[in-house]
Image (cartoon, rainbow, N blue to C red):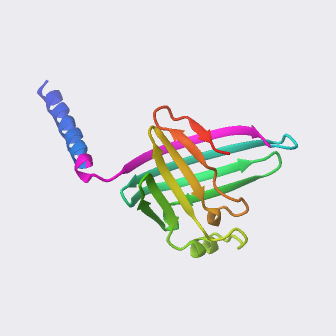
Amino acid sequence: MKTRHFKLSLVTALLFSTASITTLAQEPALDLHLQCTQTKLEDGNGERLIFADQANIKLHGDTIDDFQWESSLFRTDHGHECSIDKDDQLLAEVTEKGWRISLKDAIATRTQRGYDFDRGYQCSIRVEREGEMVHIRPTCPALCGSRMNFTELKINTSNGQCEYQD
């Protein structure tokens, strides 16, 4: 019985310590894991489009602890993917609404991936909080190969539902 009490006390102490560290830091933090899929009909000829995104984003102030995002767009006969991860030499900047993620050297990153030059070298991903929603607004054609950009979406952090933006 004493052993259980000791283990419970130790766990409780660790939880309080973690909460204290988080409170003392006073920096914005985000730990987001998402998997989203949506099928839409494309205007015009009625072709099916399937959007699929998965990401792990863990930010603490201007520190990126984890960042991995794969954004895919599938059509009937082909698909396109954008991907970005922490190894792409990412920079985080805290903004009024959340964060702005960018590449340290977009040209070098794009060249390293073997992409052609017709999509440009810019890359900015805004991760913004709006109450219980996290809005991910990408402008990052540098890492999308033949696709124009990552998909913009909102995630409800209380229920995990995704909402794709047009």
The extreme left residue here reads: 2
Q: Position of residue 144 (x, y in %)?
A: 66, 61
Residues rendered magenta in the picture:
22-42
Identify the residue at horizontal 68%, vertical 55% (top origin).
81
Identify the residue at horizontal 17%, vertical 39% (top origin).
13
Given residues 132 and 83, the one toward you in this image is 132
Q: Position of residue 53 (x, y in %)?
A: 61, 46
Is 59 drawn above or below residue 93 in the view shown?
Answer: above
Identify the residue at horizontal 51%, vertical 65% (top origin).
102
Is 121 drawn above or below residue 67 in the view shown?
Answer: below
The extreme top residue here reads: 1
In the picture, measured across the screen, residue 147 lies left or right of residue 101, that is right
In the picture, measured across the screen, residue 17 lies left or right of residue 138, that is left
Question: In which image quadrant can residue 9 be found?
Answer: top left
Question: Magenta includes 145?
Answer: no
Locate the C terminus and report the quarter of the image it occupies. top right
Identify the residue at horizontal 64%, vertical 44% (top origin).
165
